[in-house]
Amino acid sequence: VAESLQIFDPRANITLISATDTVKRVTDLVQTGEVVSSFNVEEISPNFSTYNFINDTATSVDLHHKNVIVRSGDIVSYDKLCIATGAKPRSVCPELKGVLTIRDTDSVETLQRRLKSS
């Protein structure tokens, strides 16, 4: 998202706040229908030359003062704000212990850890 926003305003000062130290980016986007797309997602290290990166979690937004407050207590000012909250998959059996829904590399790594310790 941060790199895409730079296209619309090359002079914009863009800050990306993320709870993880990697950034996910869509590649190989192909429109397969009117509303359906095919794409891949890759994890990359933040591109510090394109945008500012803060490895923290946003806890609140002060719309009046145009600030985002992060878990560490820091206040991040903004002119324009884009909130990308990420996504969590729905589990088909959330009540069953040991059921893990695979969505991304984090969930695959969790599965690998569980398999090694079982």
Image (tube, rainbow, N blue to C red):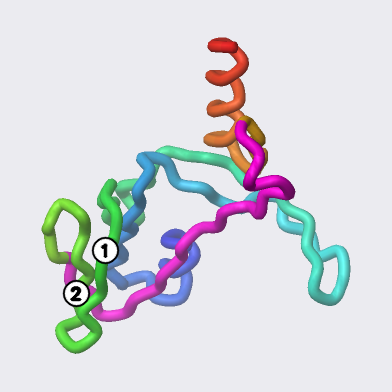
Q: Which mark is residue 114?
A: none
Q: Position of residue 19 (x, y in %)?
A: 35, 48
Q: Give the amino acid type for the residue marked by disc 2 in the picture.
A: Asn
The image quadrant that residue 65 belongs to is: bottom left
Q: Nearer the viewer, residue 27 or 100?
A: 100
**Given the current orientation, which residue lies at the most extreme right position?**
33
Tell me the magenta residue range.
Answer: 76-97
Label drawn at residue 67: 2
Front of the two marks 1 and 2: 1
The residue lying at 12 percent from left, 59 percent from top is 74
Q: Is residue 40 visible?
A: no
Q: Percent position (x, y) of residue 104?
A: 61, 40
Q: Quadrant of residue 17?
A: bottom left
> Crowding at label 2, few (<14), some or many (≥20) Cα neighbours within 10 Å?
some
Tell me where residue 55 appears, x and y as whole percent.
Answer: 28, 47
Residue denoted by label 1: 59
Asked if disc 1 and disc 2 are in contact, CB closer than 8 Å, the reply is no
Determine whether the residue tagged by mark 1 lies in a helix, strand or loop: strand
Q: Quadrant of the C terminus?
A: top right
For residue 82, side relative to residue 90 (left or right): left
**Number of numbered labels in the structure image:** 2
**What residue sits 62% from the left and 30% below the top?**
98
User: Secondary structure of the magenta portion, mostly?
Assistant: loop
User: Is 31 contained in the magenta span?
Assistant: no
Residue 104 visible, this angle: yes
Residue at figure coordinates x 54%, y 28% from the top left = 110
Amino acid of disc 1: Thr
Q: Earlier in the sequence, mark 1 or mark 2?
A: 1
